[in-house]
């Protein structure tokens, strides 16, 4: 029995299903979560299906979250999607159900759950949800609402098909979603929109970013500075790709100071693998897109980190890694 079949059997078995995703969600997190929830509702109208986590106002055009009491978890199946490790799961009640399933496309460094389906070759967890439907032999059914959410997730994680995680299979899955009459141009525009605050911060980043001898880039954004730009619900997420728009930049890191004084690191690359560096700092992720955290960021710590990032950039040969 395939892992997809086992997951489908569990979905059929439980009358209550609660779906979680990672904190600080991106379009794939909410798209795969909401898309899977809608598929289950569409297929099994009598089941109680919930999607939980903090609602991100900037992504409400994709879906919104449910608020549920603790006792709802009793005798429920919990599915965590698009979340590599348990500390990043939004709403830590994920372990309060009767059974737990992990569905993810990140490296499987934290293998949690009674069932664990990880496919690092998938462009996104949204792509995997469509694969689950296609593996069900008609037992799960898509509709237009679910297709739209899953399309939003796919274009989010592929950068509207600009990233090298886009495969022929990704495009076939996307074509399948188009058959449901989704408004793809509108969603592409929504994903591309920025606020005036983001525009001003982007200009600040381009003016103040540093580039190392081997074309690694970085910038540190202090919390007090970020507050001045009135970024709205999306926060600094739209800024992550800004450094990489410089044609000479090979890989880069955005350091964002949180309100508590800790730092969130966003690592990206056009070729050299950077998730190993993220793991050194308590994080992880994809070879070319990862995240990490630092409790403090002294001048010495920054110097040490940037030296490592520069060494990674030095390995770049002009060819992208898978």
Image (cartoon, rainbow, N blue to C red):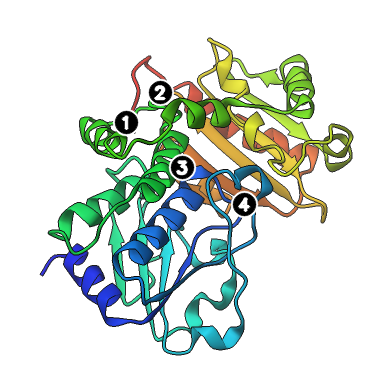
Name the disc covering residue 24, or none: 4
Left or right: residue 266 compared with residue 219: left
Decide which of tag 4 and tag 1 comes sooner along the chain: 4
Marks 4 and 2, Cα distance to the nearest angstrom? 23 Å
Kindly indicate the quadrant of the structure image that contains residue 112: bottom left
Name the disc covering residue 166, or none: 1
- In the rendered image, the quadrant that contains the N terminus is bottom left
Tell me which residue sits at (76%, 50%) in the image. Answer: 296
**Secondary structure of the residue carrying numbered label 3:** helix
Marks 4 and 1, Cα distance to the nearest angstrom? 23 Å
Decide which of tag 4 and tag 2 comes sooner along the chain: 4
Marks 1 and 3, Cα distance to the nearest angstrom? 19 Å
Quick one: label 3, few (<14), some, or many (20+) residues within 10 Å? many
Q: Are marks 2 and 1 in contact (CB under 8 Å)?
A: yes
Name the disc covering residue 162, or none: 2
Instruction: Identify the residue under disc 3.
Output: 275
């Amino acid at each position: 029995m395939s892992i997809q079949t086992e997951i489908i059997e569990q979905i059929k078995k439980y009358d209550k299903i609660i779906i979680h995703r990672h904190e600080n969600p991106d379009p794939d997190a909410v798209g795969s979560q909401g898309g899977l929830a809608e598929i289950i509702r569409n297929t099994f109208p009598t089941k109680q299906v919930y999607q939980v986590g903090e609602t991100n106002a900037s992504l409400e055009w994709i879906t919104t979250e449910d608020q549920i009491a603790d006792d709802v978890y009793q005798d429920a199946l919990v599915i965590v999607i698009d979340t590599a490790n348990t500390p990043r799961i939004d709403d830590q009640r994920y372990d309060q159900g009767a059974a737990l399933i992990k569905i993810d496309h990140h490296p499987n460094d934290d293998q949690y759950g009674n069932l664990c389906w990880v496919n690092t070759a998938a462009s996104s967890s949204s792509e995997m949800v469509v694969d689950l439907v296609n593996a069900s032999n008609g037992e799960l059914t898509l509709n237009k609402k679910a297709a739209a959410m899953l399309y939003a997730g796919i274009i989010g994680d592929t950068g509207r098909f600009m990233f090298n995680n886009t495969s022929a299979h990704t495009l076939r899955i996307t074509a399948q979603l188009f058959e449901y009459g989704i408004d793809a141009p509108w969603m592409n525009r929504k994903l591309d929109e920025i606020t005036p605050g983001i525009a001003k911060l982007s200009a600040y980043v381009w003016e103040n970013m540093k580039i190392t001898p081997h074309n690694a880039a970085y910038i540190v954004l202090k919390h007090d500075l970020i507050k001045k730009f009135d970024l709205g619900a999306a926060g600094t997420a739209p800024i992550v790709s800004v450094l990489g728009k410089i044609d000479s930049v090979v890989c880069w890191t955005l350091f964002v100071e949180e309100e508590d004084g800790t730092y969130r690191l966003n690592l990206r690359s056009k070729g050299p693998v950077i998730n190993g560096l993220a793991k050194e700092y308590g994080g992880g992720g994809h070879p070319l897109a990862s995240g990490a955290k630092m409790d403090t960021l002294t001048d010495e710590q920054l110097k040490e980190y940037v030296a490592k990032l520069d060494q990674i950039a030095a390995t770049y040969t002009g060819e992208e890694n898978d």
